[in-house]
Image: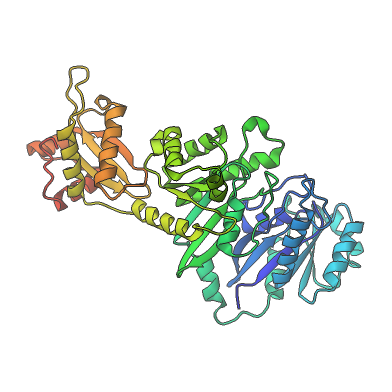
């Protein structure tokens, strides 16, 4: 028996997404006064009262989607209902029963599943006095809530727990497995209509998100958990991004913010391009965000079947992206057709490979050997009558691999020489396809005294760590330049 699912159902603008965010204590689902904001199923795994259950936010029943996606939204709602173990029927306590509420109630009445009537927006006891008129909609337990007033959250959680199916023996294990961190999280980002949602559906092997030729169909960042060869993976589908001046409303603005947040959450980023389109300003903005976060990235050229019809080739695309994003020439590329699933699983395997690179730690002795050889081949130029010197190098972190160089004066090392050194490190160390973060730090006076044999004062934690690594790696001599 899988983890129980709790579907949140109701007409538009009764506060379904607000309730999910309120229960989750997180901004999971986009909330906006515009009817029909939620289109896909948005899920969040809860753990309350020793039970795991999955909350499923759905689109509003009865909405006429302005992009003519009503049938797609309706299909996602029905999937949520079909898979639910418990249904939360949400209504608006301020407005009172509406004709569309009755339509929803008639639909749910035919479903033989546990249901809770949630009268939301009861921001004051006076509003609660008028809820009796909702009882005709559904016979069953009723809970009044107010997200704005933070009223009765515990009562709603308790009612959910009481109406869940009995826990199976293995449910806790299944829920804990879902709740545990996946072994790899990857975000799928790109401008609108490049095939991100199609890719997600190909991975999930089901219609997990709505796919349409209409740009901007996806509005939420949607987490999709799945397993490949026993490995737990999390794919984050993000809204397509537009130029700031083209944003039509707050919904699109939050979509852009969510794409940026997804990049920060991810272990690896899939930067999607349309094989039939040139690189845009939006693409460059997204890549700048990826670079600023030092995230491993794969350039994914989708719709490759269409590009081949126009006699495009992989080498030309590689040169083109290399010229557009010179700072990411090391990033691997993948060519796929998400619509048919071609090369989809190969892309996931590639992501696992570069994630492994990002988590690799190299010995201090090996790093100093590489740095010493790099300095010997190409010494940094003399600046302001001072000779730049590197004394010591060590890796202090992973994800991204972070290297600290102790030197006589960081300002003497210009950007071009630092790029040269990063290139050598990427070629010689096992970081061929991932960004490396490089810090130059001036050797402190205490370290100078150590190299001359003087007794040091109380060292800092960083100094103790560096000294410990130096002691472990006998190749390192603090007294001399590397």
Q: Residue at x 53, y 49 (%)?
A: 304
Tell me which corner region of the image, top left, top right, bottom left or bottom right, holds residue 215. Answer: top right
Q: What is the basis of the colouring in this image?
A: rainbow
442 left or right, relative to 291? left
Foreground residue, 454 or 433?
A: 433
Q: Residue 301: x, y in percent?
A: 51, 46
In the picture as drawn, the residue positioned furthest to the left comes out as: 453
Q: Is residue 295 visible?
A: yes
Tell me which corner region of the image, top left, top right, bottom left or bottom right, holds residue 152. Answer: bottom right
In the picture as drawn, the residue positioned furthest to the bottom comes out as: 169
Which quadrant: the C terminus?
top left
Image mark count: 0
132 left or right, relative to 289? right
Q: Is residue 84 visible?
A: no
Q: Residue 347: x, y in percent?
A: 46, 56
Q: Residue at x 51, y 52 (%)?
A: 336
From this view, report whether residue 240 is shown above or below residue 243: below
Foreground residue, 186 or 169?
A: 186
Foreground residue, 283 or 462?
A: 283
From this view, report whether residue 191 is shown above or below residue 388: below
Which quadrant: the N terminus?
bottom right
Foreground residue, 455 or 243?
A: 243
In the picture as drawn, the residue positioned furthest to the top comes out as: 384
Q: Residue 467: x, y in percent?
A: 18, 46
Q: Residue 17: x, y in percent?
A: 71, 54
Q: Residue at x 72, y 37 (%)?
A: 249
From this view, report whether residue 131 is shown above or below residue 82: above
């Amino acid at each position: 028996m899988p983890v129980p699912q709790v579907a949140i159902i109701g007409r538009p603008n009764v506060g379904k997404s607000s309730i999910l965010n309120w229960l989750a204590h997180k901004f999971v689902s986009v909330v906006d006064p515009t009817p029909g904001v939620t289109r896909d199923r948005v899920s969040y795994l809860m753990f309350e009262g020793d039970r795991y259950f999955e909350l499923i936010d759905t689109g509003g029943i009865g909405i006429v989607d302005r992009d003519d996606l009503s049938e797609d939204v309706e299909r996602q709602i029905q999937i949520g209902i079909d898979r639910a173990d418990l249904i939360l029927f949400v209504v608006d306590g301020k407005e009172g029963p509406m004709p569309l509420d009755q339509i929803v109630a008639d639909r749910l009445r035919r479903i033989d599943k546990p249901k809770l009537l949630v009268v939301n927006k009861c921001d004051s006891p006076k509003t609660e006095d008028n809820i009796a008129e909702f009882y005709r909609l559904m016979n069953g337990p009723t809970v009044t809530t107010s997200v704005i007033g933070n009223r009765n959250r515990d009562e709603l959680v308790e009612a959910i727990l009481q109406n869940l199916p009995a826990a199976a023996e293995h449910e806790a294990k299944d829920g804990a497995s879902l709740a545990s961190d996946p072994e790899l999280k990857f975000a799928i980002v790109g401008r609108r209509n490049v095939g991100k949602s199609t890719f997600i559906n190909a991975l999930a092997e089901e219609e997990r998100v709505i796919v349409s030729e209409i740009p901007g169909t996806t509005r939420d960042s949607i987490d999709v958990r799945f397993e490949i060869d026993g490995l737990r993976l999390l794919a984050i589908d993000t809204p397509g991004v537009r130029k700031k001046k083209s944003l039509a409303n707050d919904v699109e603005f939050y979509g852009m913010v969510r794409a940026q947040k997804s990049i920060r959450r991810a272990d690896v980023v899939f930067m999607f391009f349309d094989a039939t389109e040139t690189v845009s300003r939006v693409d460059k903005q997204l890549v700048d965000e990826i670079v600023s976060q030092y995230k491993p990235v794969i350039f994914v050229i989708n719709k490759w079947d269409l590009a081949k019809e126009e006699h495009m080739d992989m080498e030309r695309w590689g040169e083109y992206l290399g010229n557009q994003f010179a700072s990411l020439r090391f990033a691997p590329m993948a060519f796929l057709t998400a619509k048919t699933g071609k090369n989809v699983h190969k892309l996931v395997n590639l992501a696992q490979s570069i994630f492994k690179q990002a988590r690799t730690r190299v010995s201090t002795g090996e790093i100093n050997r590489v740095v010493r050889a790099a300095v010997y081949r190409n010494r940094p130029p003399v600046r302001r009558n001072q000779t730049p010197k590197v004394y010591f190098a060590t890796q202090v972190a992973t994800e991204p691999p972070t290297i600290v160089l102790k030197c006589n004066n960081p300002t003497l090392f210009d950007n071009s020489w630092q790029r040269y050194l990063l290139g050598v490190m990427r070629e010689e160390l096992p970081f061929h396809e991932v960004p490396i973060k490089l810090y130059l730090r001036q050797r402190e006076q205490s370290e100078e005294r150590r190299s001359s044999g003087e007794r040091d004062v109380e060292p800092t934690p960083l100094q103790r760590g560096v000294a410990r690594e130096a002691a472990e790696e006998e190749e390192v001599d603090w007294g001399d330049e590397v």
